[in-house]
Structure formats: structure tokens, C-alpha cells
């Protein structure tokens, strides 16, 4: 009766309730309000899931998922990807020597070169990744070992890094604070990869690898910042800090070619600092922009990958890869999603059929049988 | 009394929940152990890896650390917040129970009181219901129904009809305040119906009047006297008895008593004594609204002019100075009248000399002039004066003229007299200790034996044909449960003798009034009276009336003196005072003369038979535990359809333990035999009802016989324990509760039910006529028995389902969410990392998914209320197919595991090997987990209202709002899992949505499929009923209507006069 006003009547108003009493006995009237809410008569949708009611949903899901799956699968297949392992553990590998001799502190860089062939040309922008396997960048202690304030350019944190950075907080010899501190920064990937195209005529041309734009915009511009100071020179800014133990160069000399890409805002560094979710991961290394003149960014043919082998993976039996990939709207190559969508869609469709049968066999019968005589 | 202190009641569900929480703890420990062992082994593989922060820690120690880290990470698995949520849900459930309009009692303006907040769901699991009788099944509004005096039964047919009329009226105008009325209006029904002899007419005037009255004197309700229902007040006198009584007055007028040719003087004496006893043998306090109580009313004689005062004193002096002439004649008649009874019982005692009589007013004069004034002044009711005037001839003609109408009406009949009298009279309110007393006083009043006032030493009583009398009250021997009677010792106003009036339980009084001294003839007459009265008593008991016997005894002065001394001694003694008083009372209450007996009806409350029937259909065994007599109890059981004609009654009454044991064995074998027979014949029609009395119960409850009693009572459909003490009641409840291990519910209204209420799993108090003890010790206090039906069938059912489902959902939610973190451990070296921001992790359970389960637990309705009320079987069905059982727990666990696996591994495979960062990986997982958890609830919900929708949408919105803002603005906060930029980037990526959709659908598929298949293949009763709710309910109703129409003609329309519920037993209606 008074269902229309249920929400307005939550308070026990003296005026509400029975009207028979008029004004006299209203004050002590304990009659509950006859509202839909209080009497639990709110209009309700009763989703009773039976084969009959669920059946359309299953078909619809099936009909939507299968095309999506096919779309995803096709998209994923169109993505060109090339992967080459250069760990060099195998005897025949060009990097075998480097991988064997290597320690963090060796001063002489070990360079090795790998030949590979691209069967198909890569159109549009090509993204160059380095991949590590068995590297637990998500280890709890490891993930913690950084100081976001220091990386954000906080001058006090620069000189007094967070305790989380231990034992990579201060350098053992000079007792100076390490910038950037922590295990993540300390283990920065420091192989250098260069790519050369061997043209059909035999000449090798170096392919330009763009360093900019590999990090997230927010990271580059907001999260990571060099300490602000009146001094222009980065060297001056980082004075009084020590470089991480495993680093060969201090943070302000990470990219000798581009002064804007030094310090905490070095994009390679930023990419590394975004810890990977899984022990096998890839990180964006360079971008090969599509040149307007040529038809394909990377034409099919032979290439040389020149690796300056610095990064040790032997201790955790890891592997190092170089990956070239184009990307689509759904990211990198991943046939799984497409297959998964198709599978789930098919299952739904199949179940829809099963439910349809059940619905016609049982639901109708039991409904009619239920009517009491 | 028998209180053993409140028991902490914990619901069954909570006990069950605790074991499941322990399982969760076990699961947590297993998870943590897995992680710690895994971490140790994993660490063994590495030596100085780049990601190792400190390589020195030994794998074992690191594993140990990880164990504790994992405990912290996964601690959400232990649903601590569940306990808080349960409390909140129960509070919400209580709120709705409290606000249920159906539990509102218009007459008392009271709702249900929920005193225990933590056992709502137990209402849905009740298997045994123990009910008190008086005040629980019945109204505890005693209405005088019939009486037997001098061995003659007065059936009070008019009165019975009136009760029916009330019934109908009440049903009709259920919403209106009818019964509890303060004002005993002068135009009472009794005189109406007498004067116009047409109860239907009076009904109409009555309703109109009552409404009017209600509006006018709403304020008077405050002063409502206890047990002062109008129904109890307005007793329609039996015409036969009225005729006989009028003989008293007429014979008072025509001295010779020739008019009462058919009426022996002895009988008249009996009748007069009987009503006098009804009026004075009580502890009723009289008050009128205009006056404070405990006062002899003087309102009727307001201080008039001096003139009148003078006249009054004149008259007084007239009386006292010439007693022989004026007073002598009526006195002599009345004394003759009152001693006539004695002539048979005692060798004719010379009536107390006139000086004693004369001293009566004189004494009073000295005591209190007011009283005297009252007594003398009232012209229209000064019947004594009337008679005096009449007898003394013409010399007082002037006086007679003044009150001519009164006398005339007196001659015409009582009714008219009463009317004029009560018009002047303002209302009298009787406040009695027990409703029985009030009923009797009102009954006496209907016969114009009106108790007008009470002071410490005297009572003012109107007697028909005699007028106002002051009865000197010598002693009151109050009621106690050992003697089961009460007595008053008075000086008889007319004869001046010391008379003891005793009122008490029939068994006791009949024993005390065994023999009678006197002549042979007198003895013969007396034994005849006794026989007849006993017969009537039996009839009354069979009809379910409460019986009381009235007896009197005339004491010799010397006898009285002797007794008085002892009594005073007893009263003044300090040691053993109680015993001495008891002894003294017992000394006095001997050799009583039985006057008659009364039958008081305690009507069944409305809808009691329907409620009991519904409860039995719901599979609840209803037991009646009462202190009443066996016959009365059986009758009530009959009336409330606990007992059907097809049922077989097994009565267990025996005197010794061995006999009891043998009897139980015998009954048991009989029942078993019968069962076997029925099994073979395949038609089980009759069921057994065990009737056991208090004494036998005492034996049956002993350790050796407990087992067979239990076995026997379980085989019976119902058990009626009569004559049981409060302690026995609680013992019975305890026996069932502990030995069978079922949920018990005890309902009662009086102090004697307190222990039972406390012992039962759910104690329900009925706030009625008998004070607050039961209510105070109860878990729920209702005002009518019929409320139990909805309380159990609807709210109990709902509360159980809601809570059980909520708990299951809650546990599922925790397990599902925590497992996501656990699976991640396999990919982070079991190091205890998380891929979800710490704050999101905390708030997920606390904020984002906390309200929907609460709403689910408070508002969900698995079956509509109408259906639950209509089909009580659903209650039993839902009890047997419990929601919250280990099976369901593990099914939910399994589902939680499945969902978490899907929810983790689909994103895992989608993102494996990609450049996704920790939090970018966690983002789709967390989002889909949220959707899965919320949608899972939508699937599980039986009803979805806008509140559900709102809460679900808000929860999701809150999550998105939070993570977006957090990742947009918080640059360097929440250290290891800084969300900055992650979520803002995620929602721009199609991949995020693709993953979330896939994960959500895939995770919920089995649940939907399971539900759909279960509902389609398994014909569960609640669902069926819900499905056919709309269509079939209508059909059902129509068929019922048709059926009723057909049968109402066929079945005899005669309804039992006193217990309208006692209808001919009907066949089961097709369900």
C-alpha cells in the first residue's frame, strides 16, 4: 500500500503507522511502519537459474566469445616475433667464452656477435626486447630493495636512502650513500645490444635503435626525477653519492650519448626498475621506428646481433634472449588468449546445447508433473 | 524460583562455523608450510644470484622466515571479519523481525522483543517445541463460564453465546482495540442482553459503544486494572440462577418465603453463601478511576448538605435505638435464612443474639463514620432498608416513596435494577493477583453480589435482596501452592457467626469436604450434592475448563478463639513461621461444607490450532508441558488440534518407579507393534500421543528410565506432560536437547516457565498476563502464540538460510582471494611477494567486498514469505537438507579453488613472458577477482532488490575509484607495491578488458552450470514452490475456497461453546 514511500520512512515518525489513533495515542504507538522495506516486501528480481533461463546466456556467451577468440588469434598470429637466445652456455655459441669468463667486476667488456635470419620482413615499428629467464625480479626482498623517494628526486633521500635498500644502501668502502640504492638498481641489466643488417650485397648497416619512449610516460616524467638543485650539472648533483656496487659507471653517466637520458630518468634504468611479474620476462630495450621511405622496418634477411656481454646469469642458471616483435592493439604475440576465448566460447555453446536438451527433457516434464491435482 | 542463571546461548551454526574456521586455519598452515619448504628448496638452487639480497641466510632459516611472512600475507584466509559480519547480519535480521507488522499486537501496542541477538538462525532449525498451556496456548484471560451450586448445574448458555460473539467480533475487528478496556461502562453487556434478551442487538450497540468509548477514554487505558478485560467482566447470568436468587430478594420482601415454592431454603442459602464466597474469598483490590485504590468507596455518598447529614444521623439513631422494631424483622428473616443451612449441619444453634447483630453497625460507627454512611445512605440499594421498610409496614412510607423505583425494579428483576444502579455507579476496577480471582469476582458481580470495597479489616459487599453489607474480615489465609487453596475468615454480616470460606483446587477441597456431620437426611443430601458436584467437575474438566471448588465452614466462637490463639502465635513466631502458619491454616480448613464449583474458561488464543498444525506439518514436534490437570490438558490439546480423533492416546500414570518402568516398556512395545503392523498394512493413519503426569514424569526422568522414556516419546507425535513442575519442564527440555541433540524451543508466559525457557535452545516468552519473568529470561518475547508461526516458518527459515549462505559465501570469498596470492608464490620463489597493492589487499575484504555479503545475509529471501507460510513442509525440508553442512562447505572450497585457479592462471598465461610488471600483472587478476566475487553473489542470491544492485555497483565503483585515484596521485607511497601509473595505464589497454572478461566468465561457468542443472534436475521443494508461486498459489487458493464452501455445509456448524477451536477433525487438505 505504502510501497512507494519505503525509503523515506526509515525513521519511526510519530505520524507514520496507523491513522486510527489520531493524535492522542500516537506518541506511544509502537506499531511498525508498513513500508515495503521494513516488511521485506521490496520488489525483487528472483534470478532462478534453471536450464531454461541460463540457456540463452550460454548461447550468447558462446556466440560472442568465439568471434572474439578468432579475432584475437588472428591478431596474435599477425604479430611477427623473433627471439634469439644469446646466453652462450652451449659450447658452439658465439657468446660461450663471454659467459664463462664473466664476473660482475671484470673491466674489459666481452663482445660477441650472433648471426640470425629473419624469414619475414617486419612491418611497422619493431620493438626490441631483452629477455631474462629464471630471474626472480619478483622476489620479496628484491622488490622491496629500492627507495622510491630517492628515485623521485628527493634530496634528503638521495643522501640518506631508505633502510629498505640494505645492504645496497651505502657503499662498503666510502660509506657514501648509494644512488640509486637497493638491489633492483644494483642488478641493472647492462648488456649492450646492437643490430646490424646484412644487406643482400654483403654490406652491413647498423640499424638505428631508438632509446626514447621505452619507459612509461608517467614513470619518465613523474615518478622518476633527478634531484632538483640549482646546479645544472648532474655530476655535481650526485656528488657525495656512490655508484651501485655492480655498476661500472655512475648513474649520471648511463647514457653518454644523450645528457637528457642520464641520472634517474635514464629510460633503460626506469624500465628495469619496473620489476617483472614473473621469473621469465622481457623488457623493452629499444624501438626500431618505421622509416617512411622503406616498405618494411626490418626486411627479411640476415642480421647480426652484437652483444656486449656484461650481465651474468650463470649463478641462477638463467638465460638471456633478444626479442624482436611488432605489436598490435592487444600487445605482443600471445596465441593463448585467442585459443582460450575460442575454447570457453565453444564450451559455452556446447553446454548451451546440453542445457537445451535437459531443459526439454526435464524442465517441462517436472513443471507439468508438479501441478497438484 | 527455579532459575539456574542465564545460559550463554550459542547458535548451532556458530558452533559448526568454528570447525570450518579451524579448517581454514589448517589450510593456511598447509599453504604456509608449502611456501616455506618451497622457498628453502628454491633457495638451494641459487648461489649469489643477482636478485638475491642477502645470500648468507641458510635456506632452512629463510624457509622459516617465509613461513611467518606467509602467515601474514595469507591471514585473510582466517575470516576474522566474518564474526563481525555475522553479528551485523544478525542485527539486521533482528531489525526486520522487530519491525514485522505481523508481530504487532494492537491491543497491547507491543512488538516482538528480540532479547537475544545471536540466535536468529536457530529459529530455522527447531525440531521440538515445548509449550506451556496457560497464557501461552490460551489467553490467560479467565472468563467465568458455568457453575454448579448445591449439586445443580447452571450452564450459562447465554454467557457461552456471548463468548462466541466476542470471538467473532474480535476476528472481525481484529485491528481495533476491543478487549482491553479500562472503563467498565455502566451500560454493560450483561444487563443489555438481559433486558432485551437479544445478544445480536447488544453486540451492535456494544461495538459502536466501544469505539466511541475508545476514542473518548483513551487516556483511561493507563489505569486499566489487571485482568480487567471487558469479556471477563460482563458475565451474563444464568436465568435459572437469577430466578432463584431473585427469590432471595422477593422472599425478603414477602417474609413468608411462599414465593419460593420450588426452591428450598437450603439451596437458597447455598446459593447466597456461594456468591458471597465468590465475592469475598479473594485478595482482589477494588478501585475506581475517580478514587485511589485500597479505599472503601465513598464516591457514591458524597458529602451532601448538612440537612441530609442530619437525616442520616437520625436514621442511624433510629436504627440503633430501636433495633427490635426496625431491624429485627429483616434480620430475623435473614438470620433464619442463613442458619437454615446450619440446622442440617449443626444441631440448631441459637442464632447469635441480636446484640451481636446490633453491634455490627455500632461497631462500625465507632470505627469509621464514612463506612457507615455509605452503608446507610444509599437509598436505591439499601435493600435491607427496603425490606425493613416493607416489613415494618406503613410507618416508613415516606422513605419508601423516595426509592420507589428502586424497589419496583427490584421486584421486576435484577437486570433493571442493575441498570439504574450502574448508571449512577461509576466503574469499579478489580485488581486481582490472578485472573481466576478476577473472573470469579466479576461473576459474582453479575449476580449483584458485588464487592464494593476493601479495607484491612472489612469488606463492603452488595448482596441481592439484602443490600450493602459490611463484612468484617478476620483473617485471610492466602493461596499457596502446597495447600492449593485460600480461605478467608469473616464474621458473617447477617448471622454474625465466624465463617470460613475456602476456595481451591477441586481435588483438595473435595478431600476436605468429605463428610458432613449431622442428621442422616442431611448427610444424604450432602453426599448427593457432593456426588453431583464431582460429576460436574469432571464435565468441566473434560471441556477444558479450569475448575475451582467453593466451600465454607461455620466456626463456633470457642473454636475460633482456640484457633485464633494458635494463629496469632504462628504469626508472631520467628522460627518456623511458615510451617506454623501452614499448620494453622490446615487446622482451620477441615470439615468444610461444599457449596459448589465453578468452571472458568481460559479461551484458546486465536489461530492456535492453525499454528500448531502448521508447526507439525513443518516437522516440529509440539509438546505441551503444563501444570494443569490431565483432563484439562488433553482437552486443550484437543482444542488446538494437537490431538486428533484418529490419534491414539497413551497415558502414563503410575505411582512407583518400577511400575513406571514397566509401563514405559509396555507402551513402547505397543507402539512398536503398531508400527510394524502399519508398515505391513502400508497405511499409517493413527499416531500416538503420550500423556504423562507429573508423578510419572518424575520417575521417567530418572537415569534408568530416561532411555525408554526418550524412545517412547520420540515415537509419539506429541507428548503432553500435565501436572508438571517448573523443574520437570526444564528437565524434559534438557533431556531432549542433550540426548537427541536437536534444536529445542520453549515457549511460556509465566514465572514457572523460566527455567524451561532458559534451558531450551531458543526460549520464547509470551508477554501476557503473568508478569515479566518469562519475558526477561527469554530470547524472543512475543505477545501471541500465533506469532510463532511466522517467526519460525518465515523468519527462522530466512535467518538460517541467509546466515548459512552468507557464511559459506564469506569463506568462499576469502579462500578464493587468498589463493590468488598463494598461486603467485609458485612464481616468485615462495618468497611471500604479492602482485597486488598492499592497500588494495587490505581494503578488498574490508571495503570493496564487505557490504554485499551483509546485504545478502540480511535481505536474501530464498522463498517468498507467503509460500513459506502456506507450505510449512518447506521448513522441515530445509532443515533436513541443510545449507550449512560440511558437504556444502567443501563444495564451496572446491569452487573457490577452481575460481582462484582460473582467476590466476588465465591472466598468467595471457601475460607469461611479456613485459608485464608485478602490479600490471596483478591488476587484471584483482579486477576479475572482484567481478567474480560480486557476480558469484548475484548467482547465489535468490532475490535481488535495488539495494543489492546499488551495493554491488557501489562496491565495484568504489574499487575502481580507489585504484584509479591511488595510481594517479600517489607517487611514492605504499613502498614495495607502488601503484603509481599502473591502473591508469591498465584501463586504457584492451588487453586488460579482454583478460578480465575471459577470466570472469570462465570462473563463474561451473557455478552457473551447477545451479542450473541442480535446479532443473533436482526438484528441490523451495524452488518448486517459488516457481509455482504465482500460478499454483492462485489455483491452490481457489481450490481451497471451493473445498471450504463444499465442506462448510456438510460439516456440522456446531462449534464447541467454550473452545471454538474444537471443531470436528477434518481431513487433510491436499497440499
Image (cartoon, rainbow, N blue to C red):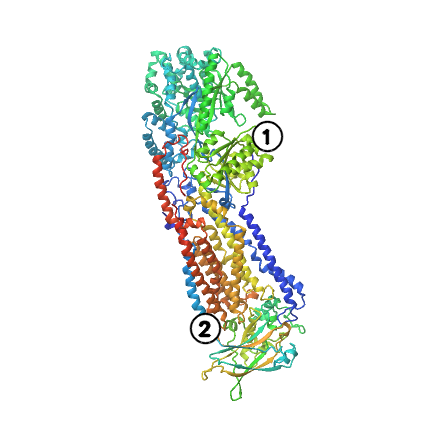
Percent position of residue B736, x then y: 55, 39
Of the pair B10 and A235, the residue shown nearer to us: B10
Q: Is residue B634 visible?
A: yes
Q: Which residue corresponds to mark 1? A: B658
Q: What distance separates the C-alpha of mark 1 from that of mark 2?
A: 90 Å
Same chain? Circles 1 and 2: no
Residue B635, numbered label: none
Of the pair B191 and A368, the residue shown nearer to us: A368
In which quadrant will I find the N terminus of chain B? top right
Quarter of the image holding residue B786?
A: top left
Q: Are marks 1 and 2 in contact (CB under 8 Å)?
A: no
Quarter of the image holding residue B918?
A: bottom right
Q: Dot 1: what SS?
A: helix
Q: Is residue B426 visible?
A: no
Specify the subunit that label 1 lies on: B
Q: Which residue corresponds to mark 2? A: A74
Percent position of residue A100, x then y: 65, 78
In which quadrant will I find the C terminus of chain B? top left
Q: Is residue B865 above or below residue B215?
A: below
Percent position of residue B376, x then y: 40, 19
**Label 2 crowd bin: few (<14), some (14–19), many (20+), radius 10 Å:** few
Q: Residue sitting at 54 percent across and 15 percent down?
A: B559
Q: Is residue B286 above or below residue A226?
A: above
Q: Is residue B381 left or right of residue A137?
A: left
Percent position of residue A14, x then y: 40, 44
Specify the subunit that label 2 lies on: A
Amino acid at each position: 500500500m505504502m510501497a512507494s514511500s519505503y525509503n523515506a520512512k526509515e525513521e519511526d515518525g510519530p505520524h507514520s503507522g496507523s491513522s486510527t489513533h489520531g493524535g492522542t495515542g500516537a506518541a506511544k504507538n509502537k506499531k511498525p511502519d508498513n513500508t515495503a522495506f521494513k516488511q521485506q516486501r521490496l520488489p525483487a528480481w528472483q534470478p532462478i537459474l534453471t536450464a531454461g533461463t541460463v540457456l540463452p546466456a550460454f548461447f550468447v556467451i558462446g556466440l560472442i566469445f568465439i568471434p572474439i577468440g578468432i579475432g584475437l588469434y588472428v591478431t596474435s598470429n599477425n604479430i611477427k616475433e623473433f627471439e634469439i637466445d644469446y646466453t652462450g652456455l652451449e659450447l658452439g655459441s658465439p657468446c660461450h667464452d663471454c659467459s664463462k669468463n664473466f664476473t660482475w667486476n671484470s673491466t674489459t667488456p666481452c663482445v660477441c656477435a650472433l648471426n640470425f635470419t629473419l624469414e619475414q620482413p617486419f612491418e611497422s615499428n619493431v620493438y626490441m626486447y631483452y629477455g631474462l629467464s629464471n630471474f626472480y625480479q619478483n622476489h620479496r626482498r628484491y622488490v622491496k630493495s629500492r627507495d622510491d623517494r630517492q628515485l623521485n628526486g628527493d634530496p634528503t633521500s638521495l643522501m640518506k636512502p631508505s633502510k629498505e635498500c640494505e645492504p645496497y644502501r651505502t657503499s662498503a668502502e666510502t660509506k657514501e650513500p648509494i644512488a640509486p640504492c637497493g638491489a633492483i638498481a644494483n642488478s641493472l641489466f647492462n648488456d649492450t645490444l646492437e643490430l646490424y643488417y646484412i644487406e643482400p650485397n654483403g654490406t652491413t648497416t647498423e640499424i638505428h635503435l631508438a632509446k626514447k619512449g621505452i619507459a612509461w610516460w608517467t614513470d619518465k616524467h613523474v615518478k622518476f626525477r633527478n634531484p632538483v638543485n640549482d646546479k645544472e650539472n648532474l655530476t655535481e648533483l650526485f656528488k657525495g653519492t656512490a655508484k651501485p656496487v655492480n655498476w661500472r659507471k655512475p648513474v649520471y653517466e648511463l647514457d653518454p650519448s644523450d645528457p637528457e637520458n642520464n641520472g634517474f630518468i635514464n629510460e633503460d634504468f626506469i624500465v628495469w626498475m619496473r620489476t617483472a611479474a614473473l621469473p621469465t620476462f622481457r623488457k623493452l630495450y629499444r624501438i626500431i621506428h618505421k622509416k617512411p621511405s622503406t616498405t618494411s622496418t626490418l626486411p627479411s634477411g640476415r642480421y647480426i646481433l652484437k652483444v656486449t656481454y656484461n650481465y651474468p646469469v650463470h649463478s641462477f642458471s638463467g638465460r638471456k634472449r633478444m626479442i624482436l616483435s611488432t605489436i598490435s592493439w592487444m600487445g605482443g604475440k600471445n596465441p593463448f588468449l585467442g585459443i582460450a576465448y575460442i575454447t570457453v566460447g565453444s564450451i559455452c555453446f556446447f553446454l548451451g546445447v546440453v542445457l537445451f536438451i535437459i531443459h526439454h527433457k526435464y524442465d517441462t516434464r517436472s513443471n507439468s508433473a508438479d501441478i497438484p491435482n | 524460583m527455579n532459575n539456574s542463571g542465564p545460559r550463554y546461548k550459542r547458535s548451532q551454526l556458530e558452533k559448526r562455523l568454528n570447525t570450518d574456521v579451524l579448517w581454514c586455519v589448517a589450510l593456511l598452515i598447509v599453504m604456509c608450510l608449502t611456501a616455506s619448504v618451497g622457498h628453502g628448496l628454491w633457495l638451494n638452487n641459487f648461489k649469489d644470484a643477482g636478485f638475491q639480497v642477502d645470500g648468507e641466510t641458510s635456506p632452512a632459516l629463510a624457509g622459516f622466515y617465509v613461513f611467518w611472512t606467509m602467515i601474514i600475507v595469507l591471514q585473510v584466509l582466517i575470516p576474522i571479519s566474518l564474526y563481525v559480519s555475522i553479528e551485523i547480519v544478525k542485527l539486521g535480521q533482528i531489525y526486520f523481525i522487530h519491525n514485522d507488522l505481523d508481530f504487532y499486537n494492537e491491543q497491547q501496542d507491543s512488538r516482538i522483543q528480540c532479547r537475544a541477538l545471536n540466535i536468529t538462525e536457530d529459529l530455522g532449525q527447531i525440531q521440538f517445541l515445548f509449550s506451556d498451556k496457560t497464557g501461552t496456548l490460551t489467553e490467560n484471560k479467565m472468563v467465568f463460564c458455568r457453575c454448579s451450586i448445591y449439586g445443580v448445574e447452571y450452564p450459562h448458555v447465554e454467557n457461552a453465546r456471548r463468548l462466541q460473539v466476542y470471538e467473532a467480533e474480535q476476528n472481525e475487528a481484529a485491528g481495533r482495540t476491543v478487549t482491553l478496556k479500562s472503563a467498565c461502562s455502566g451500560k454493560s453487556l450483561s444487563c443489555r442482553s438481559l433486558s432485551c434478551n437479544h445478544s445480536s442487538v447488544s453486540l451492535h450497540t456494544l461495538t459502536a459503544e466501544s469505539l466511541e468509548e475508545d476514542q473518548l477514554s483513551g487516556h483511561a487505558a493507563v489505569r486499566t486494572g489487571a485482568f480487567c478485560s471487558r469479556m471477563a467482566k460482563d458475565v451474563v447470568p444464568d436465568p435459572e440462577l437469577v430466578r432463584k436468587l431473585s427469590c432471595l430478594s422477593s422472599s425478603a420482601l414477602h417474609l413468608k418465603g411462599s414465593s419460593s415454592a420450588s426452591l428450598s431454603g437450603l439451596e437458597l442459602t447455598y446459593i447466597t453463601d456461594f456468591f458471597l464466597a465468590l465475592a469475598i474469598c479473594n485478595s482482589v483490590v477494588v478501585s475506581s478511576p475517580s478514587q485511589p485504590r485500597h479505599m472503601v468507596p465513598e464516591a457514591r455518598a458524597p458529602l451532601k448538605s448538612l440537612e441530609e447529614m442530619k437525616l442520616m444521623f437520625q436514621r442511624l439513631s433510629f436504627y440503633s435505638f430501636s433495633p427490635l422494631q426496625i431491624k429485627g424483622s429483616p434480620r430475623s428473616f435473614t438470620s433464619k435464612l442463613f442458619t437454615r443451612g446450619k440446622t442440617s449441619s449443626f444441631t440448631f444453634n441459637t442464632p447469635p443474639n441480636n446484640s451481636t447483630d446490633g453491634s455490627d453497625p455500632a461497631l462500625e460507627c465507632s470505627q469509621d463514620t464514612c463506612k457507615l454512611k455509605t452503608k446507610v445512605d444509599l437509598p436505591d440499594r439499601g435493600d435491607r432498608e427496603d425490606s425493613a421498610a416493607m416489613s415494618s409496614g406503613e410507618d416508613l412510607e415516606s422513605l419508601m416513596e423516595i426509592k420507589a423505583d428502586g424497589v419496583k425494579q427490584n421486584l421486576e428483576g435484577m437486570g433493571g435494577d442493575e441498570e439504574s444502579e450502574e448508571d449512577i455507579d461509576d466503574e469499579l476496577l478489580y485488581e486481582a493477583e490472578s485472573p481466576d480471582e478476577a473472573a470469579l469476582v466479576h461473576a459474582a458481580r453479575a449476580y449483584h453480589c458485588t464487592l464494593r470495597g476493601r479495607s484491612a479489616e472489612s469488606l463492603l459487599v452488595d448482596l441481592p435482596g439484602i443490600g450493602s453489607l459490611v463484612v468484617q474480615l478476620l483473617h485471610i489465609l492466602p493461596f499457596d501452592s502446597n495447600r492449593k487453596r485460600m480461605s478467608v475468615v469473616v464474621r458473617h454480616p447477617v448471622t454474625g457467626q465466624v465463617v470460613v470460606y475456602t476456595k481451591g483446587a477441586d481435588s483438595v477441597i473435595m478431600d476436605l469436604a468429605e463428610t458432613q456431620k449431622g442428621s442422616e437426611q442431611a448427610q444424604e443430601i450432602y453426599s448427593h450434592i457432593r456426588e453431583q458436584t464431582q460429576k460436574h467437575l469432571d464435565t468441566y474438566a473434560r471441556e477444558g475448563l479450569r475448575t475451582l471448588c467453593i466451600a465454607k465452614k461455620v466456626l463456633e466462637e470457642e473454636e475460633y478463639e482456640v484457633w485464633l490463639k494458635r494463629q496469632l502465635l504462628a504469626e508472631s513466631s520467628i522460627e518456623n513461621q511458615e510451617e506454623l502458619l501452614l499448620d494453622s491454616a490446615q487446622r482451620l480448613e477441615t470439615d468444610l461444607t461444599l457449596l459448589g464449583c465453578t468452571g472458568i474458561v481460559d479461551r484458546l488464543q486465536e489461530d492456535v490450532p492453525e499454528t500448531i498444525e502448521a508447526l507439525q506439518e513443518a516437522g516440529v514436534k509440539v509438546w505441551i508441558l503444563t501444570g494443569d490437570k490431565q483432563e484439562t490438558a488433553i482437552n486443550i490439546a484437543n482444542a488446538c488440534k494437537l490431538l486428533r480423533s484418529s490419534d491414539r492416546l497413551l497415558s502414563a500414570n503410575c505411582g512407583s518407579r518400577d511400575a513406571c518402568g514397566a509401563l514405559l516398556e509396555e507402551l513402547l512395545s505397543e507402539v512398536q507393534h503398531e508400527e510394524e503392523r502399519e508398515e505391513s498394512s502400508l497405511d499409517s493413519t493413527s499416531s500416538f500421543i503420550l500423556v504423562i503426569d507429573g508423578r510419572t514424569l518424575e520417575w521417567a526422568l530418572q537415569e534408568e528410565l530416561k532411555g525408554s522414556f526418550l524412545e517412547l516419546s520420540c515415537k509419539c507425535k506429541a507428548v503432553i506432560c500435565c501436572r508438571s513442575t517448573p523443574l520437570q519442564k526444564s528437565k524434559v527440555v534438557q533431556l531432549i536437547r542433550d540426548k537427541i541433540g536437536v534444536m529445542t524451543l520453549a515457549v511460556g508466559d509465566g514465572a514457572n516457565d523460566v527455567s524451561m525457557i532458559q534451558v531450551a535452545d531458543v526460549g520464547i516468552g509470551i508477554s501476557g498476563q503473568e508478569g515479566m519473568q518469562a519475558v526477561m529470561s527469554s530470547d524472543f518475547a512475543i505477545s501471541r502464540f500465533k506469532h510463532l508461526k511466522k517467526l519460525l516458518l518465515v523468519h527462522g527459515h530466512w535467518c538460517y538460510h541467509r546466515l548459512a549462505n552468507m557464511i559459506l559465501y564469506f569463506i568462499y570469498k576469502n579462500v578464493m582471494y587468498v589463493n590468488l596470492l598463494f598461486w603467485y608464490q609458485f612464481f616468485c620463489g615462495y618468497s611471500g611477494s604479492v602482485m597486488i597493492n598492499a592497500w588494495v589487499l587490505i581494503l578488498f575484504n574490508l571495503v570493496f567486498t564487505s557490504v554485499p555479503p551483509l546485504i545478502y545475509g540480511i535481505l536474501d529471501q530464498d522463498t517468498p514469505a507467503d509460500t513459506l507460510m502456506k507450505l510449512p513442509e518447506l521448513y522441515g525440508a530445509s532443515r533436513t537438507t541443510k545449507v550449512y553442512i560440511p558437504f556444502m562447505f567443501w563444495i564451496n572450497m572446491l569452487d573457490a579453488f577452481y575460481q582462484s585457479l582460473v582467476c590466476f592462471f588465465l591472466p598468467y598465461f595471457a601475460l607469461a613472458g611479456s613485459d608485464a610488471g608485478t602490479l600490471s600483472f596483478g591488476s587484471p587478476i584483482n579486477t576479475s577477482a572482484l567481478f567474480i566475487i560480486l557476480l558469484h553473489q548475484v548467482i547465489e542470491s535468490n532475490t535481488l532488490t535495488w539495494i543489492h544492485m546499488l551495493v554491488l555497483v557501489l562496491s565495484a565503483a568504489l574499487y575502481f575509484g580507489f585504484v584509479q585515484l591511488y595510481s594517479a596521485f600517489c607517487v611514492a607511497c605504499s613502498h614495495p607495491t607502488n601503484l603509481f601509473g599502473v591502473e591508469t595505464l591498465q584501463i586504457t589497454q584492451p588487453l586488460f578488458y579482454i583478460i578480465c572478461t575471459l577470466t570472469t566468465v570462465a570462473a563463474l561457468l561451473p557455478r552457473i552450470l551447477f545451479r542450473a542443472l541442480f535446479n532443473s534436475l533436482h526438484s528441490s521443494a523451495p524452488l518448486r514452490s517459488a516457481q509455482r508461486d504465482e500460478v499454483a498459489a492462485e489455483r491452490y487458493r481457489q481450490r481451497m475456497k471451493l473445498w471450504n464452501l463444499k465442506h462448510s455445509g456438510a460439516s456440522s456448524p456446531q462449534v464447541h461453546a467454550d473452545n471454538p477451536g474444537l471443531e470436528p477433525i477434518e481431513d487433510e487438505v491436499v497440499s
